[in-house]
Amino acid sequence: MTVSAAARKRQSAPQAAALLAWYDRHRRRLPWRAGPGERPDPYRVWLSEIMLQQTTVKAVGPYYARFLERFPTVEALARADRDDVLRLWAGLGYYARARNLHDCARVVAERHGGRFPDTEDGLAQLPGVGAYTASAVAAIAFDRQTCPVDGNVERVVTRLYAIEDELPAAKPLVRSLASALAPAQRAGDFAQAMMDLGATICTPKKPACSLCPWNDACAAHRRGDAETFPRKAEKAQGALRRGAAFVATRADGAVLVRTRPDKGLLGGMTEVPTSEWTRDFVLDDALDHAPLQAAWRKLPGVVTHVFTHFPLELAVYAATVPAEAAAPRGLRFVARDEVAAEAFPNVMRKVLVHAGIDQKPHQKPRRKP
């Protein structure tokens, strides 16, 4: 581990009180965040933390509102049909989170009487709740003395101590230093203050160091190279995969789809039939993977999408089949006005757009008064 010893000797220790005073004046207003003097709702805290993994606050806002309206309590979410949960989640990505969200709600409702465990260890036993989420919910919902480390907090801590080690190898050190900063009182506010500091002041580019309540305690600020932290090892991008997607439309407008297996990438989501996605996909053999006999035509261009571990290119083929056509085994036709409600992941919505399929909810015309 490499925290500059000289820098640590020169800097003053970061004081929780200074950060909390700043937070009291500048805290962000977020739909899942309890106001000053309000008791946090563990369900809302947990729901927001699951949604915010690998996703921005701006992107999560509308999804969070829709989820809370549809499932106002953990018991309501536990009773929901899995497909309904996936439909509401569609577009947020990392779909295993949605499945784990539903599983966790059921465990809390059935084994814990609808109450979330109030300790970090207890929370970590729930489905889909990792170390970060357990720490975040324990601190924010139950004021436990712990400091969750997300990307914002990671950036704050690596700059405070000028940590030279590259991420992800430096993560244990960052967690240890962050944990040492957490106060015994107002631990939940402190955790959220750390997140807000990273999101609004200690930003990746052009941090507003002059406005930071901890600038006197920050080694990177003293050195004048805050923007260079955290140090990050280069990510190795996976090899490009290719495949073919088949958009079959019945004469009545219905679209042929299937549901992916629960396990694996995009588990439980809806998709149009596709070939396997491989590095050595042969375009000339694409029609061997077509789901049914039809006059398939290849559409110009390709659909591109980047997953966490690999980029993808899909050639798109379209065909129109008779209105009386039956769906092959394992597939189904979805009426055109129900397409928008299906749990299509973003890559599949791109395919539908490429094929000219309207995905806007259809509304019945209003009757004239």
Image (cartoon, rainbow, N blue to C red):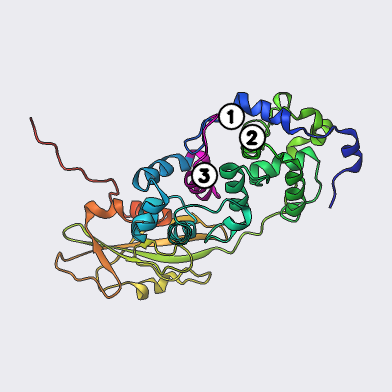
Secondary structure at badge 1 equals: loop
| Residue 139 percent across, percent down from the top left | 62, 44
Q: Residues within 10 Å of mark 2 (few under 14, many from 20)?
A: many
**Mark found first going from the N terminus, 1 or 3:** 1
Mark pair 1, 2: CA separation: 7 Å
| Residue 178 percent across, percent down from the top left | 73, 44
Q: Which residue is mark 2?
A: 193
**Mark found first going from the N terminus, 2 or 3:** 3
| Residue range of the region highlighted in magenta in the rendering | 36-58
- Above or below, 199 relative to 282: above
Q: Which residue is mark 3?
A: 45
- Above or below, 29 relative to 155: above
At 39% from the left and 71% from the top, the residue drawn is 286
Secondary structure at badge 2 equals: helix
Residue 50 lies in the magenta-colored region: yes
Q: Amino acid at mark 3?
A: Val
